[in-house]
Amino acid sequence: MHFTSGKRLDTEVSRGGVLEREFMLGEVPGILWTPASAPPAEAPLILLGHPPLGLDKMYPRLAARARRVVADGFAAATVELPGSGVRPRLPVIEEARADLRRAMAAGEPVGDDVVDRLVLPLVERAVPEWRAALDALLALPGIGGPVGYSGGVISVGVRLAVVEPRVAAAVLFAGSLIPRAVFEEARRVTVPLHVLLQWDDEGNDRQASLDLFDAFGSEEKSLHANMGGHTGVPESAGEEAGRFLARHVRRGRSSRAT
Amino acid sequence: MHFTSGKRLDTEVSRGGVLEREFMLGEVPGILWTPASAPPAEAPLILLGHPPLGLDKMYPRLAARARRVVADGFAAATVELPGSGVRPRLPVIEEARADLRRAMAAGEPVGDDVVDRLVLPLVERAVPEWRAALDALLALPGIGGPVGYSGGVISVGVRLAVVEPRVAAAVLFAGSLIPRAVFEEARRVTVPLHVLLQWDDEGNDRQASLDLFDAFGSEEKSLHANMGGHTGVPESAGEEAGRFLARHVRRGRSSRAT
């Protein structure tokens, strides 16, 4: 892992400012946000998930989320998803995406096989990369465990919550296009979950989101449904998610791994 | 309206303490909680709803909710429901309740007519009483508008939100036994709503709660589903509901009536 740039962000929410550093982990670009002035103790880390639209396109929203997370006393980081942004396209996913577009344009239902071909290869490739990023990030001075995961492709979040013992809690964004296999995998999630659902998101299959929430094995899980359309998560809902992470991802709080 | 008793509650959450006064409004007993030391401005009022089990039985939970509400800068009040507590039983409701018990004991589905006979007479009688209580309470020194409604029988909360323009926002507890007519009435609710649902409450019809949430006409509505069984609302969920009221029920914020 090596840093390729660093700058200090002006911010209203984080006293003392935020240091933003781009990095490369092998072929995978990423961004790390930390308090500009080193805090007295190691900061727990929040991984910021995102849809597969490329870090460049997602940057404004990611940076806004990172500012809030750092203001809450965390470090924040994200990495580019396989096949997105500057990374080489993945033919299997591109073909599935073309099939998805065709089905939607024709007003046809999206078949299970299209969803599987679109999402499962992304999950298979992304999760090991996020775990490798965790290895590198937690080795940096000033960053410690436990780790929270927030947002992005919900199937990636589910897999990460199942296989990565350093993830102590997760904020998940309910979304459509969930492979059948992920509903089964959801039963194996045990960490506290805070699930955000945009109730009036017409591009979303609300019943699938409710079914997935029901499937989660976590003893502590909560669903927060709001109005405002696909990207209109109310500010108060973002703040609630922040408080959830602050309650569950704290230094000295033992994650499952310790 | 006349006060029949008054005492000061010790409290950890409300600096300065809480004054609790029992009152009678005609034949209807009620309780008012206010800051023990008069605040500089009039406090907005939160009406505390409750299930029809009698104020005596509900007192510990109501007093705990009132302490928190007063700590947030509100006055809080509740009145006994028709047919509950020290008030005379209502034969129509008692008969419906017996039919409900019979159906449940026999493992039979509860018919729409039973639900209607159980809930609608309660709504018809309770809502005018709560409105009369509002008239009396808002005339007291130190208490002003707007008004929030929190909890209790959801059908009562829906009717009150529709017909009472002084209600500026409502926290509703999702529950079963919702008459068909209430789903229609829900479309006419326009105030901001914060709906709490216990996801793993086995005595609750979850789908009915989701359908009712969907029916609400309010542009701003949010659903907060948690684990913990019928009475196990997590503390963090109670705090979120308090923050919702603090955002929407504020002095100087115009309610629909002004």
Image (cartoon, coloured by chain):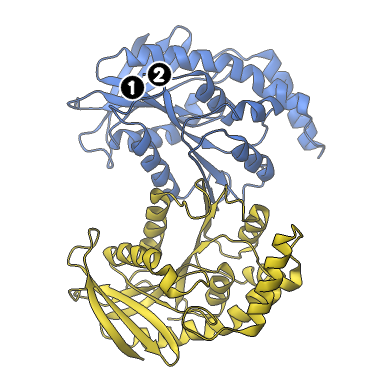
Chain colours: A blue, B yellow
- Residue B148 relative to residue B158: left or right: left
- Work out which quarter of the rendered image holds the N terminus of chain A and state it: top left
Disc 2: which chain?
A
**Nearer-the-camera pick, B15 or A94:** B15
Disc 1: which chain?
A
Residue where numbered disc 1 is placed: A145
Q: CA distance from mark 1 to mark 2?
A: 10 Å
Amino acid under disc 1:
Gly
Which quadrant of the figure has residue A126?
top right
Whole-percent x, y for residue B200 in the image:
57, 47
Residue A97 shows up from this direction = no
**Nearer-the-camera pick, A7 or B241:** B241
**Nearer-the-camera pick, A100 or A247:** A247
Label annotation for residue B26:
none
Q: Which comes before the other along the chain, label 1 or label 2?
A: 1
- Residue A203 relative to residue B20: left or right: right
Secondary structure beneath disc 2? loop
- Residue A39 relative to residue B246: left or right: left
Within 10 Å of disc 2 (Cα), the crowding (few <14, some 14-19, many 20+) is few
Within 10 Å of disc 1 (Cα), the crowding (few <14, some 14-19, many 20+) is many
